[in-house]
Every structure is written in C-alpha cells, then in structure tokens.
C-alpha cells in the first residue's frame, strides 16, 4: 500500500467506515424484506463463479507437481457439486418465465423447447453409446417398464421434456470458458515464476537486500519504493535529497539494469544506457559481467576521463605561455641565443 493511501486510511478511517456503514444500512432498510431473494441471487452467482473458477484451476499450471495434483483433485471433486447446483438454479431461472409466458401471449414453453432441441442432438451423438448399456443391463438385470424409462431419463434418452439439457449446456459452456482462461494463463504464470527467480538472483548479485518494506544496497544505503511505472522502478534513498535509484525490467518483469544512487537529472542517461552499475547474472545465478559506465561528466561532476583530458589541456596551455615569455626574454637580451634554444627545447618536449 502506498504512503498516501496509508495516511488517508489512518486519518479518515472513521469517516470512510461511517459512509460505508450508512450506505449498507440504507440498502438493508430498502431491500430488507427481499433479503432471501438477495441471498438466493448470491448463491446462484457464487455457484456459477465457482464452476468458472474450477475450470481455471484444472487447466492452469502450478509451481510444482504436488501442488498441481492436489489442486486438480480438489477442483474435480468440487465440480459436480457446484455444477449440479448451478444447473438447478438455471432450471428455476428458465422455468419461471416459461410459466408466465405460457399463461400469457407466448402460448408455448420457449426455453423448454430449446432444451428439447438440444436433447435431440444429444441423443443423435450419444444415443449409440448409452443404448447398448441399457441393453446389457436388461440382459443381466431385467428391467421393468418403469425402471427402463428411469434409466433412459437418467442417461438423457427419455422422451420427458426437461430443462436439464439447456441448463447443463450452459454450465458446460461456463466450465469450458474457465478451462480456456486457465490455459491462456499458463505461459504468463510460467514467466512470472521465472522472473521471480531471476530477480532474486539479480538483487543478490548487485548487493540489494530487502529490509522489511525497504531495500538496502551494498553501500548500506537504504531505499523505499517510490514508484513503479512502465518498465522502471524508482527507489527513494532515505535521508538524501535530489537523488534516486532505478531498476529497469523487461516486458516479462525480469530486472535488466541497476543505476545505483544517482541524481534525478541523470535519469535520462540511465535510461539511454550511459549510466549503469548492474552486475548481470546467468540463468544459474552466477555473476556474468559488471557494467559500470560512470565516467560521464554530468552537471559539472569531475569524472576520471574528463579529469585527465582537462589536465592535458592545461599542461599544453601552460607550455605555450612559457614559450611566449621565453621569446620575450630573448628579444629583450636577457637570454642569449644558446640559453634560449636550450630552454625552448625543454618546453617543446613537454608538449
């Protein structure tokens, strides 16, 4: 939670809670007499959501084999329970308007006719599979007419009109949506675990450790999280103004670069790659290389490269001034020609 949000909740918690409780009280007073209807709607929504969620849990990957097996067994065991409840809820949902429309101008059961049409396709696809089962049962366990019709109804081969085919088709569709969602998450979850592992190695190689909610670098400077946006993490150094530390990451969330503590105006140089103190790591976590580009003269700072160049330029200017002074002394007669030539050679060697 951000510092601003924490402070807001701390200062205005009673006011915010008061608004929420007042709103909830008004809702209860207005719809209190329909509370069982609200509960029933919540149960229906919960069951439908659980069918969708169980489909996700069954199809998506987990960190390890044990957790994957446990999750799938747990999800498969709960699926029939929530599936049957959801199907029954849909029967009520479709049966109620059908009863109203039957007595009105509709003249027929609209949703029931759709369900019966789905039953015809079901019998066409699965009838040749389930009918031999009934025939085998009839041989070893002779069935009476009522029992035979019961088995046919249970297997979906009966002639009795029912909403079950429509409701089961909808529940199956919700479950398949969950399966598809879980499959689409597999690659993302894989990269999430991979980036977590990589980032742990990256921070360790660069001497960055977590201290509670803060971070500490190899120089024992502590930082707090300032902002995360785009492909950049901004850290604020405790007790220091005008400076920040940055961590770059790629589109998979893997850390790629570390700036160390730099001036805020140097942020663009870090983003362009001119400044970097990152120790990159291999897949096995070993340090690969250290990239340290901090010899750039920014905002008047004297770095080693610019320092050597300025010293060389200063020596050249000093030698030219000495040659000029030496020539004036020779012209005025203070130095003879041999003395002039000797000192001139020394100054030219310095150039």
Image (cartoon, grey):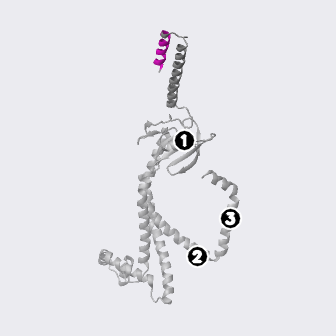
CA–CA distance between discs 2 and 1?
Answer: 61 Å
Tell me the SS state at disc 2: helix
Of label 2 and label 1, which has the lower sequence position?
2
- Asked whether the beta carbons under mark 3 and mark 1 sit within 8 Å of each other, the answer is no
Residue at position x 52%, y 16% from top? Answer: 327
* Magenta highlight range: 338-350
**Circle 1 is placed at which residue position?**
266
**What secondary structure do most residues of the magenta stretch adopt?**
helix
Of label 3 and label 1, which has the lower sequence position?
3
**Circle 3 is placed at which residue position?**
19
Is 165 above or below relative to 307? Answer: below
**Circle 2 is placed at which residue position?**
37
Q: Is residue 33 left or right of residue 284?
A: right
Q: Nearer the viewer, residue 70 or 26?
A: 26
Is 22 above or below relative to 329? Answer: below
Q: Position of residue 306 (x, y in %)?
A: 51, 31
- Asked whether the beta carbons under mark 2 and mark 3 sit within 8 Å of each other, the answer is no
């Amino acid at each position: 939670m951000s510092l601003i949000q924490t402070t807001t909740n701390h200062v205005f918690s009673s006011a915010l809670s008061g608004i929420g409780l007042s709103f909830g009280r008004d809702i209860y007073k207005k719809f209190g007499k329909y509370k069982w209807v609200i509960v029933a709607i919540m149960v229906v929504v919960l069951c439908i959501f659980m069918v969708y969620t169980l489909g996700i849990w069954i199809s998506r990957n987990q960190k390890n084999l044990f957790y994957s097996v446990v999750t799938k067994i747990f999800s498969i065991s709960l699926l029939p329970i929530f599936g049957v409840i959801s199907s029954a809820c849909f029967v009520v949902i479709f049966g109620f308007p059908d009863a109203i429309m039957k007595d009105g101008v509709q003249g027929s059961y609209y949703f029931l006719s759709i369900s019966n049409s789905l039953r015809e396709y079901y019998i066409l696809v699965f009838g040749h599979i389930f009918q031999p089962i009934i025939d085998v049962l009839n041989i070893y366990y002779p069935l009476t007419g009522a029992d035979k019709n019961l088995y046919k109804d249970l297997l979906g081969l009966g002639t009795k009109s029912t909403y079950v085919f429509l409701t089961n088709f909808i529940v199956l569709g919700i479950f398949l949506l969950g399966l598809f969602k879980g499959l689409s998450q597999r690659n993302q979850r894989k990269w999430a675990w991979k980036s977590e592992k990589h980032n742990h190695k990256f921070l360790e190689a660069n001497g960055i450790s977590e201290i509670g909610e803060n971070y500490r670098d190899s120089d024992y400077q502590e930082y707090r999280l300032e902002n995360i946006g785009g492909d950049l993490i901004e850290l604020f150094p405790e007790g220091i103004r005008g400076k920040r530390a940055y961590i770059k990451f790629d589109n998979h969330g893997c850390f790629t670069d570390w700036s160390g503590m730099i001036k805020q105006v140097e942020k663009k140089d870090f983003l362009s790659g001119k400044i970097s103190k990152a120790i990159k790591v291999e897949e096995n976590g070993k340090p690969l290389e250290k990239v340290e580009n901090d010899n750039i003269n920014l905002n008047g700072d004297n770095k080693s490269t610019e320092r050597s160049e300025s010293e060389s330029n200063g020596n050249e200017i000093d030698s030219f001034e000495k040659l000029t002074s030496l020539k004036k002394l020779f012209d005025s007669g203070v130095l003879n020609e041999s003395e002039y030539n000797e000192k001139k050679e020394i100054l030219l060697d310095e150039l």
